[in-house]
Image (tube, rainbow, N blue to C red):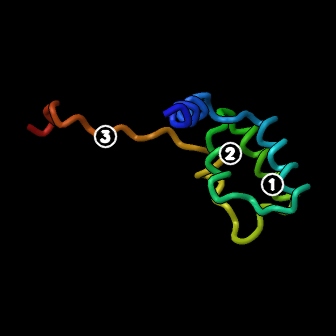
Amino acid sequence: MTLLAGILAAGLAGAPGLPEIIAEIDRLVLSGRQMPAAFMLDVRRLPDAGDRMQALVYLRRAGLLTGSAQPLDGIVFQRAPVAAPNAAEPSNGE
């Protein structure tokens, strides 16, 4: 039960900022490990588009972001979610 509480608390602590992401990239490179698949989720959670771009550039220059090109629209230039129409409100055509 204590372990579950610790895991939940760590998840609620918030997404890491750019300095934490840069430090994690450095740790990955120095240890010779590959980037975990979920790491890009942390990059997407950065609040500033400039920070997201800087993290992508740092990943690429560190040699961790290889392979096919990453779509900038989905990572750096995130669009605001489109709100679904409210079913309770009548449309103009009725």
Q: Position of residue 59 (x, y in %)?
A: 81, 54
Q: Position of residue 92 (x, y in %)?
A: 16, 35
First along the sequence among labels 1 and 2: 2
Tell me the element at label 2. helix
The image quarter containing residue 86 is: top left
Q: What residue is shown with label 3?
A: 84
Image point (83%, 54%), residue name: 28
Q: Which residue is at the front of the view, 68 or 2? A: 2
Task: Classify 10 Å Cα crowding around label 1: few (below 14), some (14-19), many (20 and above).
Answer: many
First along the sequence among labels 3 and 1: 1
Image point (58%, 52%), residue name: 74
46 lies left or right of 74: right
93 lies left or right of 42: left
Q: Gap in Å between the C-alphas at discs 2 and 3?
A: 26 Å
Image point (13%, 39%), residue name: 93
Task: Tell me the amino acid under the disc marked 2.
Answer: Val
Q: What residue is shown with label 2?
A: 43
53 lies left or right of 6: right
Task: Classify 10 Å Cα crowding around label 3: few (below 14), some (14-19), many (20 and above).
Answer: few
Q: What residue is shown with label 1?
A: 59
Image quarter in which the C terminus is found:
top left
Q: Which residue is at the front of the view, 80 or 42? A: 42
